[in-house]
Amino acid sequence: MENLRLRIIIRGAVQGVGFRPFVYRLANDLKVVGFVQNSSYGVIVEVEGKKNILDQFLLRIEKEKPATSFIQSLEHSFLDLVSFKDFQIKESISGEVEAFILPDIATCPECRKEILDSKNRRHQYPFTNCTLCGPRYSIIQNLPYDRANTTMKSFKMCSDCQKEYDNPKDRRFHAQPNACAKCGPSIELWNKDSKVLEKNSSALLKTAEMIKNGDVIAIKGLGGFHLVVDAKNEGAVQKLRDRKKRGLKPFAVMFSCLEEIESDCEVSALERRSLLSSEAPIVLLRKKQSLKIADNVAPQNPYLGVMLAYTPLHILLLDILKGPIVATSANLSEETICVDNREALNSLKYIADGFLVHNRDIAHHVDDSMVRVMAGREMVLRRARGFAPLPIFVKNVEDSILAVGPHLKNTIAFSNKENVFVSQHIGDLETPKALETFEKTIKDLTKIYDVDVKLIVCDEHPNYLSTQFVEYSNLPKEKIQHHYAHACSCMAENEINDEVLGVCFDGTGYGQDQTIWGGEFLKVDKDGFKRFAYFSPFPLPGGEAAVREPRRSAAGLLYHVLGEKAFEEKDVEFLNAFKPEELVNLNSMLRKKINSPLTSSVGRIFDAVSSFLGLCHYVDFEGQAAMSVEFSISDEKSNCVYSFGIKKNESLIVEELFVRDILRDIKNGVKSNVIARKFHDTLVDIIIAIAIRSGLKKIVLTGGCFQNKYLLERSIYRLKEEGFLPYWHQRIPTNDGGISLGQIAAASKKNVLQYDFKQKEK
Ligand code: ZN
Ligand code: ZN
Ligand code: FE
């Protein structure tokens, strides 16, 4: 097993409670070297050792920490060795103590106990919190973090709450959102006409009753509204799907305790850690056979997105229900989550049968975060509640840069001194509402942190709304190519500065030759990038329509490989997904090159393969077709891969000869799970082949396609086997949620636009 460095940054009640001596003893016990240090970030711990020992170190920190300490936030990543000699308690980094906006923190065990205790004055009070837990970012309007700067300012503490707040010995000493039933926010259950049905505890009881009866309830939570139904009631789940017009996209499920989750899903030690953490994200877990959740919650999917109840409101509701609920962000498409009572009522009245609302305003929307444990590490796929807007620990960034991110899965980021702040997930910038939230997030965060923006960075795509937003600004601007940003994002969080091969497998990104990129091998160094290799571009008949119809990617790829005769092939089964007249149209579109943009996108190749295999000809959510191919992989190992060619041009071009092989296999009746595996293994072999030709050792795996567990893990395994050093994402999404950080990292490199890579090669 390899040696690595583990960095852990911990925030919470961890300073002045014997935390550093505890870490020191743990390090000695496990015989790892490194240091522990107090800083304005929180406690920084770095240790080096074998991966399995580092995992133990991580898990034992949370299990064995001093009784008086409490972890509000813990982020960790595995990095290259710096070869420490021993373990030290380092001097604290002195200097200005920086005030950061803390993320929202899941309800602590003490508060949980109180709300379930019939003798406690906070029994059944859904806004219970203390100094250690509760809302933060979602209620903060300004810094410093005082009640007057939060949406709690309109509630005046009663004398009991004030006493707690003023008493240094109390758990609620200076707990800004401190409240009780007498003085704090309260809940109401409304019907569709905003008529109040019930209040307070009766509202919870009635909500539970309606959920039990199969109703859809919109519930205002911490950072926005969820749509909630009984997760075991197939009819209710279907009703939610029909009303939300959401075909097969999986819903997340909220449970009340770990034991319930473990009876439905496989949970590893690292997954358990993520579930129980203060961030309490959605964790993608493998379903068990014994799963008791309705099939249509995550149809045709071996995984389930699972989280634990993280606010008193959710804990109380699940306590009455005695069973899990579907809890999905309340929005119409991929736009931003609803935060306002009236707005929710207006936009959700055709979806929800009831509205459980409260009168504590949400200052910033925050969706549930999502993580998946892959290759033995946590990978954050959506960075929001629990994580945002804490700064990311990266080196070598310039001060005062604002990055406006991509178009889909938008996040924004900015640098302030040596810190990079990445916003919470904003969503797809397709609707006026999403755009409004995007602008608000930029305005709010730069104002709170008092950033004097000196440079704005955006994507090169001229039609992105985020790019257009930048056009209106008078500030200096920089445009960063989409996949270069992906690579820089992954390099930044892995602290790599030397030259790497960036393997960017993605859906779509605007390419510098005006084609759509997405199957790119970029040589990236400290100054810029060069397109070293890419997949041979194939036409996408119908352009944008192809994103929703994988059959179009399949037709385009087939035409690309077989030419004019493509559609005359008799027994190519996927062609039956088209009507005869559609095929005639398609053929002439492709022949005349009408509305058929060229793409090198691996995401679209996944789509094509999904359609070839008859898995998915249409999709109703991004990534659906690629997931269908990943999920159909068989367990049987085969050492066969398909053929591909590499052509030498100005760059290397990968030719998709495997299309013929796949069609031949389909004709010969080879099972699609075997084909799916061979296809994945072929992609990995292509990565190895290009890596060898690049002459580089460090290989960076990035882009949305690496959310695919098999592809990522197989690539890492094979690259290591061949002597390469693979890197992948951990704290920052590998999908477009990571673009904003990459834009900042890329713009921080000097003279990014003037740099001429070719000259350097001479
Ligand atoms: Zn608490
Ligand atoms: Zn009170
Ligand atoms: Fe992308």
Image (tube, rainbow, N blue to C red):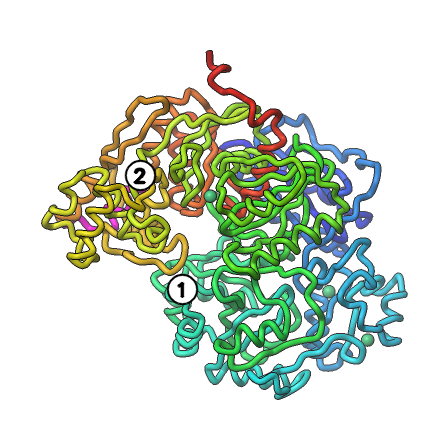
Task: Work out whether residue 157 or residue 314 is closer to the camera in this orientation and state it.
Answer: 157
Total tally of numbered discs in the picture: 2
* Image side of residue 193 versus residue 111, left or right: left
Amino acid type assigned to the residue bearing label 1 in the image:
Ala
Q: Name the residue under label 1.
A: 298
* Image side of residue 538 versus residue 736, left or right: left
When the figure is inspected, residue 717 is found, relative to residue 437, above or below; the finding is above
- Residue occupying image coordinates x 59% and y 35%: 478
Taking the magenta stretch, the answer to whether it contains residue 214 is: no
Toward the top, the furthest residue is 762
- Residue occupying image coordinates x 32% and y 36%: 537
* Residue 267 visible here: yes
When the figure is inspected, residue 568 is found, relative to residue 250, above or below; the finding is above
Residue 220, percent across and down?
61, 72
Q: What stretch is highlighted in magenta?
A: 669-681
Checking the image for residue 681, the label placed there is 2
Task: Work out whether residue 380 or residue 265 is closer to the camera in this orientation and state it.
Answer: 380
